[in-house]
């Protein structure tokens, strides 16, 4: 029987090592997809202008309920679309909080094919900040 949890996917960002293209596990691949959605700004992709949330620009926005609710809705919609088939959309949970000058995005879900719960805490700093 095929063990889907051990499947390998091309790593993002794409890179090649001495033995060929680098790969990621299923779990790492989904996290890489999440990071693509979070850190790609809308209209950044020519053929998919609606792709991405652009969370780094949110660091400079006022911290209020309206922005938080709009951000959560956009994150949920964008992630559900990007992770279609990988994640059970009914289990996708997204929350945004802040720690000092960083936004913290908490994402949890169940991988559909292997029924395993995954959870990630992704810090987001300013665009010039390399630590998140």
Image (cartoon, rainbow, N blue to C red):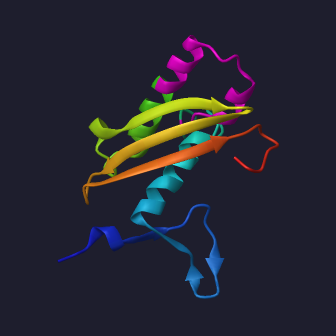
- The secondary structure making up most of the magenta span is helix
Q: Position of residue 73 (x, y in %)?
A: 46, 24
The quarter holding residue 94 reads top left
Which percent across, then down, holds residue 37? 54, 42
With respect to residue 92, does 21 lie above or below?
A: below
Is residue 36 inside the magenta stretch?
A: no
The quarter holding residue 81 reads top left
Using residue 98 as the reference point, say whether residue 129 is left or right of it.
right
Q: Residue at 64% across / 87% down in the picture?
A: 18
Q: Residue at x 61, y 66 (%)?
A: 14
User: Picture coordinates of residue 117 (x, y %)?
Assistant: 33, 52
Work out whether residue 51 can be spotted.
yes
**99 vs 89, nearest the viewer:** 99
Q: Kindly tell me whether residue 46 is visible in this rendering.
A: no
Left or right: 69 with respect to 116? right
Considering every residue shown, the one lying at the far left of the view is: 1
Determine whether 2 is above or below 57 in the image. below
Q: Toward which corner of the image does residue 47 lie, by quadrant?
A: top right
Span of residues in magenta: 51-72
Task: Report the residue that reaches farthest toward the front.
Answer: 100
**Residue 55 drawn in magenta:** yes
- Across and down, in percent, residue 120 comes to 49, 48
Above or below for 86 versus 56: below
Nearer to us in this view, 39 or 130: 130
On screen, 37 above or below 103? below
């Amino acid at each position: 029987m095929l063990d889907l949890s051990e499947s390998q996917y091309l790593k993002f960002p794409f890179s090649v090592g001495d033995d060929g293209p680098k790969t990621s596990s299923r779990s790492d691949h989904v996290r890489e997809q999440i990071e693509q959605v979070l850190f790609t700004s809308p209209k950044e992709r020519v053929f998919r202008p609606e792709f991405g949330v652009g969370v780094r620009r949110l660091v400079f926005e006022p911290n209020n309920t309206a922005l938080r609710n709009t951000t959560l809705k956009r994150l949920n919609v964008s992630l559900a679309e990007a992770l279609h088939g990988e994640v059970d959309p009914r289990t996708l949970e997204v929350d945004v909080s802040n720690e000092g000058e960083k936004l913290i995005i908490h994402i949890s879900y169940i991988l559909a094919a292997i029924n395993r719960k995954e959870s990630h805490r992704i810090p987001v700093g300013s665009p010039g900040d390399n630590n998140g």
